[in-house]
Image (spheres, rainbow, N blue to C red):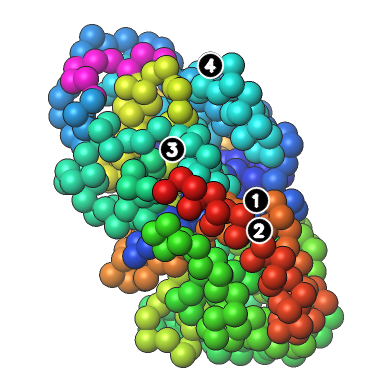
Amino acid sequence: MRRTQKCISAALVVAAIIGAAGCGGNGGRTSQSTDAAQTTAAETTTPAATTVDPDKEIDLNPDYGEIADIGQVDNKNENGAGKLYEAGKTADTIHALCWFDFYNVSPESDIAELFAERFGGTVDTEIVSSLEIYDRLGVLMASGQSPDIMRVSDTFYPSYFINNRFTALDDWLDKESPVWSDLGDIIDSFAYNGNHYYFPYALTATEYGITYNAKEIEELGMTDPMDLYFAGEWDWNAFEEIMLRWKNDHTDKYPLSWPTNFAAQLAATTGVSVIEMDGNRINNNLRDPNVVRAMEFIEKLYREEIFWEGWHGPDQLDSWSGTLFFMMPLDWALPCGQEFWFKNNYEGEIRSVPMPRDPQSDTYYLYGITSGYVIPSGASNVQGAVSYILASRMYAADPEVVAADREEKMYNGGYYYIKCPECKHPFENERGEIGETCPECGAPRKAKYKLTYTPEQMQIYDDLVDPSKFTFVFSCHPGFGTDTANNLTEVFDSLSSSGEHYAHVLDEYYNTIETVLDEYRGLMAGNG
């Protein structure tokens, strides 16, 4: 299988990440890619695009239709399928509804290649903006043209479970098989009224963390956060101490570039999600003592002038000179930072670490995230859509696939455009010896950006999907409608934007949030 590296453009990546995960998780938790209240600021009405290499003169993308030309599916690919799944049947074409093309964004492009190679399937994607996707789903379902598959997004759970928008998969996938066994608790946490509508293919390491320039820490004379993490000492206190030291040395700057509503991320490190689904019960934890303590810590950071207000991403020139830490999704911040440095000839090392641990907890909790797909009710090719879900699980768990992905990420040798910049001599692939020249004309090969993980960085990413290293906390609040999202935006933003006291703001919004949640509680009771 060909492993491709694709980078979502900076302007659209946050919207893509926001839709990358749903709600659910280990121990009755729910998973989100980001906070619901972030959607108004971060989502875009433009379909996601990919960065184009203007110098890439050979199309390395596979011909999915040609790859999918197989006669019968190997039965070993069907491990994890349920009793309704028809053995040996090719997947044919599935119709996806998404805010990006499955063939142009990783990991979907890699999963789609597996889907073609092993199940004989191709994907036809209708691209709709992330803000309009569920309205479009409603139109398609009402007209009898339901799509076959959708990438989960922030809002899909529990609201669209309650409204019967998705197909129960209990007879299509076998939760008890070894293929799904290590995700059993997560799958169960998505159960609604005894049915499983969502089989996430992986717990993923794309949630919020801290990305930074290691040189800045070295110049401070402070211990690097990565070293603190491996020593078990990376916590709120160490995080604050480094930022205050940096602020003291850079009085005209701010230590932390933060996203809208990161407060729920910090609260999760206490082991409590702000709003969660516990079975068929909705718990509002905004007054939980641990949540309150996290919010008061944010108030303290505001008073210490820690926050650099506004959007300052690692893909902007003034960001690296203007701040110390980027609190952003790790699987975006690290590659975008590396690519920006490559294009601007910066030297040094960008590193990423998890959110700092709650110093009052013996357990390292993190806000969790899953990746996966759902099948809308009325889909015409459920068999094919289930095959795609099986392919996604292969992508996450197949040892050969995992090894290839890992080797690609850790490769740090020469990486070049496929053709000589002078005589256009074609090379076999993008890799080569460092300093390699063209055998035809002797011109140096033109270097190309590639995301590269050091062994230490790879270990952190391994840890971030390891339940023995972290206990993952998930929140369902994006799945309770825009009113809940907007009210939580007001609550969380007030802490880091205006320095208001959490207790005061919560008194203003708590009952309003409860009113909306009560509406969902009523709907759930009616479905029982």
Residue 219 or 420: which is nearer the viewer?
Answer: 219
Q: Residues within 10 Å of mark 2 (few under 14, many from 20)?
A: some
| Horizontal side of residue 35 vs 486, given as left or right | left
Front position among marks 1 and 2: 2
User: Would you place residue 226 above or below residue 396 in this image?
Assistant: below
Q: Position of residue 417 (x, y in %)?
A: 53, 32
Q: Which mark is residue 373?
A: 3
What quarter of the picture does the N terminus occupy? top left
Range drawn in magenta: 85-93
The reply to whether discs 1 and 2 touch (Cβ–Cβ < 8 Å) is yes
Q: Is residue 399 visible?
A: no
Q: Is residue 416 in the magenta section?
A: no
Q: Which mark is residue 144?
A: 4
- Amino acid type of disc 2? Val
Tell me which label, 1 or 3, sits earlier in the chain: 3
As helix, strand or loop, the secondary structure at mark 4 comes to loop
Residue 2 or 179: which is nearer the viewer?
Answer: 179
Tell me which label, 4 or 1, sits earlier in the chain: 4
- Amino acid type of disc 3? Tyr
Q: Position of residue 115 (x, y in %)?
A: 34, 25
User: Would you place residue 101 above or below residue 316 in this image?
Assistant: above
Q: Which mark is residue 481?
A: 1
